[in-house]
Image (tube, rainbow, N blue to C red):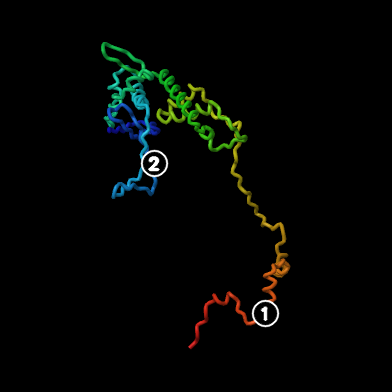
Amino acid sequence: EQTLQGQNADKFLCAGDAALYLFNSGAQQLFEVKAFHEEYHSWFIGQAVQHDGRLLFATPVDPLFLVLLYLLKAEKEQGKFQALDQVVVDSEFSACKILLQCARVVQSIHHVTEEKEIGSKVYYKYSHDKTLMWLKKKVNQTVKVLKSNDVCVGGRVQSATFISSKQSTTVTEEDYIRYAHGLISEYIPEELSAELSKYLHLGLVRASNFITLPLQKRKLSEAPLEADEDYSKFNSSDMKNKKTNRKMSAAQKALAKVDKSGMKNISSFFTSKAKATK
């Protein structure tokens, strides 16, 4: 199997970090590889121990997302029609050319580009309007999957600094769209994500139905603190009288009548013995 490290991909695309992707045999399907890592975790393989205990997940992803990043770059730098093999070029990751072997890229490239055919060759140029329409379809498809799998989306769309003043058991359509938009935004630049949000008519989260819980600090007073009650009345003699006034059980009454002369207290058996003097 072939692997591809694509620059400006995945959720770190704005920072330009690399992400790991996996192609199946024939490069017909692209998978995003993510690792789940615990600090103390190893694998037993036969009679050997593999110290790298990471658990790798390979999730299918639309390769057009990665091609879109190269189209955006070409639009900013050249802004003209070009062949795809001239657009998908990366000096650091030459394996990006494998993306053009994916049948899905060839079939869906028209969703994000303008096309011009000259002779027997087809040239492409990034289309902003088509891209927004395509991304909206992706969001709608994601919403359907979220609903069919009964995914809770309420917590995702609410700010962590707010607490709802009334418990709402219903989730609106906007909540699903906003959640799906967040998932899709992990694969596109931040600027395009903001434009998609406007295209979907997603406004800012209104805080009218939320209340804040400010951190309340206890005000310190320079005056000495005084007790509300006089605890001196609970002296030792009062406590002894209370103990004696308690109702005794039949066993305790019988034990109280036993002659204890010559008996040792049980605590005396656990005290250290005095050293004998020579």
Residue 143 spot, x, y in % from top left: 48, 26
Residue 53 spot, x, y in % from top left: 35, 45
Label 1 SS: loop
> Which of the 4 quarters of the picture holds residue 263?
bottom right
Give, as a three-letter code, the residue at label 2. Answer: Phe
Judging depth in this view, the residue of 122 and 30 nearest the camera is 30
> Which of the 4 quarters of the picture holds residue 260?
bottom right
For the point 69% across and 74% down, which residue is it? 256
Residue 273 spot, x, y in % from top left: 52, 80
Give, as a three-letter code, the residue at label 1. Answer: Asp
On screen, residue 74 versus residue 158, left or right, reads left
Classify 234 as above or below 182: below
- Quickly name the residue at label 1: 259
Q: Nearer the viewer, mark 2 or mark 1?
A: 1
Q: Which mark is residue 36?
A: 2
On screen, residue 116 versus residue 163, left or right, reads left
Judging depth in this view, the residue of 40 and 65 nearest the camera is 40
